[in-house]
Image (tube, rainbow, N blue to C red):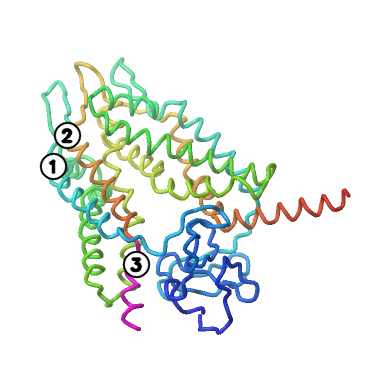
Amino acid sequence: MNTSTSPVKQTNIKQTTVKLIVCHECDLICRDLELVVGETASCPRCQAMLYRNSRATLDQALAIAVTSAILLLILNSFPLLTLKVQQATNNTTLFHAALSMWNDGMHAISILVVITTMLAPALQIMMALYVLHSLKFGDPDKAVGAPMRFLQKLRPWSMVEVFMLGLLVSLVKLQHMADIIIGPALWSCAAMICVSAGLTSILTPRNVWVWAHQQSTRRTSAEVRHV
Amino acid sequence: MAGKNGAEANLVSCDICETLCSTKDASLTHCPCCGASLHLRDKDSLAKSAAYLLAAAILYIPANLLPVMHTETIFGGQDDTIMSGVLLLLETGSWPLALLVFFASIMVPMLKLFSISLLLLTCWRKSTSNPLPRTQLFRLIEAVGRWSMLDVYVVTVLVALVQFQSLASVHPGGGALAFGAVVVLTMLSAQSFDSRLIWSAIETSHE
């Protein structure tokens, strides 16, 4: 993107003539151009993705968030794997796995497992639901900043997909010594990874602000009609 | 304006909502649009990152030497370190899986320790060479970092499942604790590193 000489007001700007965006990774000022649906804008200097024009709507995001909440509930309440050795069977849910670490004296690991596989994903989905709900039904201009900030911070600590891979590795390790029955939570886990990947890709700050803007203009026009 | 750096133009972009804010107004510490705190560069970024990295490097030694789990069967007990777990997988399981675990648990932490040290050193010396590959390296570290948690989860699942009193049981070892700490510390180290510092050396050298 070449240098342009458009003046920039030195206040809290939302540019009207030329919209600008600063690259998060290398601090280069770039022009914020309108994109065709599906297109992605990246920084010309460090190639970081700046923004994407996705077709996603608020309703789609809300639907995906509700779906992942249901899948998360299943993941947490049903057994992941059941092990059969002779007459004895042993199954484990996510919480039991963390609990057995605690009982074995590994408190820090137990807490780490609870945070990364239960707490962080649950908070993430709750925050997403809260943001989307207040956009859809509440006041779109209020109460979105703080949860979005929290959501961005939380993202790297939710490791359900790594846990899933860990499950698969243990499955291979165990298959020599016992019969294994795959529990409903494992399937739910797999589904949740796909669904929440979709949610992450559309619940971007940029989309949220676009939706907030859409909702408030829709509401004002409705009020005008009402008057 | 476009093509310059935000810092030179006294502009900072809000991390959350991308609103451009002026840094000339000192009273403006939070984004007027979403309320996030604004900062041009994190001043202590390198020091914080280095501190986390040092702690991770120290813990990396017990993480590899101490057993991550102890298996008790009717044939006797056995201690497994991360490397012996990989070798065991290679013997009994399949090599793709052994490769996967080797990559996630041994290569990735090592790669992270080396790469973050490299990034920190070059940023300290305000190096202007190869900014793009360094940024890409940083992006890679952030992307693969969490996958080294794999072994911690494998141990957790095995400890939870393999509890058949006299027949077989698995217990966690101290190595798992050290290993978990290495993963968390290297993640914190990568998160506190401000990638814009790679480019700010170039900005000043142009002036």
Circle 2 sits on which residue? B174
Which quadrant of the structure image shows residue A44?
Answer: bottom left
Circle 3 sits on which residue? B136
State which chain disc 3 sits on. B
The answer to whether residue B198 is magenta is: yes
Give the class, few, some or many, for how many residues have Cα within 10 Å of label 1's Cα (few <14, many ≥20): some
Residue placed at 18% from the left, 42% from the top? B82
Whether residue A86 sits left or right of residue B77 in the image: it is right
For marks 1 and 3, give the CA distance. Answer: 30 Å
Same chain for the residues at labels 3 and 2, yes or no? yes
Circle 1 sits on which residue? B62
- For marks 3 and 2, the one nearer the N-term is 3
Residue placed at 50% from the left, 56% from the top? B30
Give the class, few, some or many, for how many residues have Cα within 10 Å of label 2's Cα (few <14, many ≥20): some
Residue placed at 46% from the left, 50% from the top? A152
- Mark 3 residue type: Gln
State which chain disc 2 sits on. B
Same chain for the residues at labels 1 and 2, yes or no? yes
- For marks 1 and 3, the one nearer the N-term is 1
- For marks 1 and 2, the one nearer the N-term is 1
Which quadrant of the structure image shows residue B113?
Answer: bottom left
Judging from the image, what secondary structure is the residue with disc 2 in? helix
Residue placed at 46% from the left, 26% from the top? A78
